[in-house]
């Protein structure tokens, strides 16, 4: 952590209805083996809610909860893309789908496999 500079990145869903900004130094990226993450196949960066701003599209977001109902997964109602979710274990953090970030290159950032399927 900390050997990359803090960056401000813009992100959006495919159709552009949902737009957001994050600030992060990209300490690591994560994948998860839980049932929903396996299906959406996203690569995520964890961002504190104070470093996240929804710029447009609140009314275009659909929320999905499952299992304990704690994690809040968001999808664009128009194009179906998953841009982010509010995390279950650390609800003041969001998991941001880095493939929704403009001009993002994950090269050189370590990727950690999260064991979401084992969470009870």
Image (cartoon, rainbow, N blue to C red):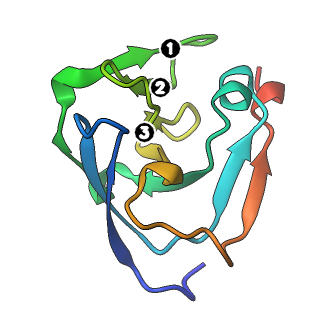
On the image, the x and y values in percent for residue 40 come to 63, 30
Q: Residues within 10 Å of mark 3 (few under 14, many from 20)?
A: many
Q: Which residue is mark 3?
A: 83
On the image, the x and y values in percent for residue 118 come to 84, 28
Q: Earlier in the sequence, mark 1 or mark 2?
A: 1
Q: Residues within 10 Å of mark 2 (few under 14, many from 20)?
A: many
Q: Earlier in the sequence, mark 2 or mark 3?
A: 2
Quadrant of the rendering where the C terminus is positioned: top right
On the image, the x and y values in percent for residue 54 come to 22, 44
Total numbered labels: 3
On the image, the x and y values in percent for residue 9 come to 33, 66
Q: Nearer the viewer, residue 70 or 30?
A: 30
Q: Which residue is mark 2?
A: 73
Q: Earlier in the sequence, mark 1 or mark 3?
A: 1
Q: Is residue 8 left or right of residue 112?
A: left
Q: Nearer the viewer, mark 2 or mark 3?
A: 3
Q: Is disc 1 placed on a helix, strand or loop?
A: loop
Q: Which residue is mark 1?
A: 65
Q: Distance from label 2 to label 3 (Cα)?
A: 9 Å
Residue 7 vertical position relative to residue 18 in the rendered view, above or below: below
Q: Are marks 1 and 3 in contact (CB under 8 Å)?
A: no
Measuring 26% from the left and 49% from the top, which residue is drawn there? 20
Q: Distance from label 1 to label 2 (Cα)?
A: 6 Å
Q: Distance from label 1 to label 3 (Cα)?
A: 15 Å
Measuring 19% from the left and 32% from the top, which residue is drawn there? 57
Q: Nearer the viewer, residue 89 or 108?
A: 108
Q: Nearer the viewer, residue 8 or 40?
A: 40
Q: Quadrant of residue 5?
A: bottom left
Q: Quadrant of residue 103?
A: bottom left
């Amino acid at each position: 952590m900390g050997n990359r500079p803090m960056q401000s990145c813009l992100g959006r869903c495919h159709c552009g209805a949902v737009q957001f900004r994050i600030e992060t130094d990209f300490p690591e990226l994560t994948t998860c083996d839980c049932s929903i993450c396996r299906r959406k196949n996203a690569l995520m960066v964890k961002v504190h809610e104070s470093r996240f701003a929804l710029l447009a599209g609140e009314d275009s977001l659909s929320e999905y909860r499952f299992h304990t109902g704690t994690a809040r997964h968001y999808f664009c109602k128009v194009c179906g893309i998953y841009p982010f979710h509010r995390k279950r274990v650390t609800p003041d953090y969001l998991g941001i789908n880095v493939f929704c970030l403009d001009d993002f290159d994950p090269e050189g950032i370590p990727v950690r496999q999260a064991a979401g399927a084992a969470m009870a």
